[in-house]
Amino acid sequence: MSENFLSQEEIDALLKSQVVSEQETESEQEHQTSTPAGEEEDLTQEERDVLGEIGNISMGSAATTLSDIVQHRVSITTPHVILSNQKELFGSFVKPYVVIDINYIEGLTGSNLLLVGLTDAAIIADLMMGGTGENVGEELSEMGLSAVSEAMNQMIGSAATAMSNMFGFPVVISPPRATVVEFDKQELEFDLNGNAIAVVSFKLVVGNLIDSQIMQLIPVKAAKEIVKYLLAPSAGDNRSPGATAEDGDVEEDNGLEDFVPGSPSDREIQPKEIKDDTFSTRMASFTPGAGEDVERGKNLDLILDVPLKVSVVLGRCKKPIGEVLKLVPGTIVELDSLADEPVDILVNGTLIAQGEVVVVNENFGVQVNNIISPEERLRRLRD
């Protein structure tokens, strides 16, 4: 009979094992709640590349708008996508920023944040109010903040229109709200509705006055929704072109917070390279495709007078530093394109068409032979 009973030592060992097991389970649960979980809290390299391309196109349009406002050359390029979380990211900021809170009211749902350095914002405000942008301090008056808000409103409006063109349905935002935030001194009112945040940093250059960075923050779930519309066209087809945040068949976690950063990615999306063999012109209008709906056409009417930079690239090549240093007048640089090969036509640094060089009234011109579709642009990116 005694063989069917446990000894006191065996009972103690079992109790000890149970306590250890419970502690391990609790530790594992705490770890799961404090760290991003699985694929929902991460982005694949392809998803990061697509987010970078979306940001490249959207911010290229926004840069053109800002250039018209401040009457200086503006470039917003080189998007770099990383992942982080709200607490760590905000805790790393040691200088004040102007934070622009952007909310979608049609086409997409959710919100995202655009961060501009306070000094950079002060320079933009000074230029808008007729100043030179020089000797600007690190303070922003109420009038200056209003000026920056208006500039950001027009910039984000242009970016939303560019996204509408990519997605095939209208993307509408509410007027952005700008706030000066000292992250190390005040509590934040912003909630990006997610532990994991996609961060896209862009290089911002305004004439000789600004050479800095701006950042756009969006929850990972929202970033995945953005990517889904381009990588899986069928997902966009199931969405009503006039869908809003109140529509029943739009998922609540569709929290698309504009473009895009955890574990950092060292990979950067490089801007389109334009060699010396290029020329540009300014377009007064951009005609939407025949398949666009009436509502989208009305939205485009608001920006038909926004100038775009059109460039033509005859070809490219890569040379080691030694050969570049040996270049002298008369040196012939061989490009990687053939004589009869189509040239690339870029708008704001983005490839949109191909054609051939012609001569018109003693000037060079380009005859468009092929329009690059958004799907083909993404395919080229993946390849």
Image (cartoon, rainbow, N blue to C red):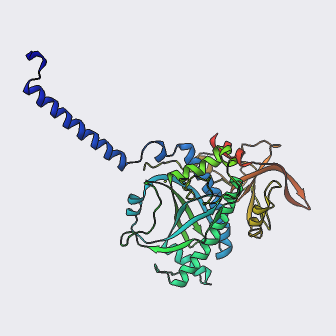
Q: Quadrant of the N terminus?
A: top left
Foreground residue, 327 or 52?
52
Foreground residue, 1 or 329?
1
Foreground residue, 51 or 242?
242
- The answer to whether residue 244 is above or below residue 144 is above
The residue located at (65%, 71%) in the rendering is: 154
The residue located at (58%, 47%) in the rendering is: 49
* Residue 276, percent from left and from top: 71, 56
Q: Quadrant of the C terminus?
A: top right
Report whether 34 appears left or right of 158: left
Instruction: Determine the image quadrant of residue 287.
Output: bottom right
* Residue 118, percent from left and from top: 48, 74
* Residue 177, percent from left and from top: 54, 73
* Residue 330, percent from left and from top: 73, 53
Is residue 256 among the parts visible in the rendering? yes
Foreground residue, 379 or 242?
242
- The answer to whether residue 95 is above or below residue 42 is below
Is residue 133 among the parts visible in the rendering? no
As drawn, the residue found furthest toward the right would be: 361
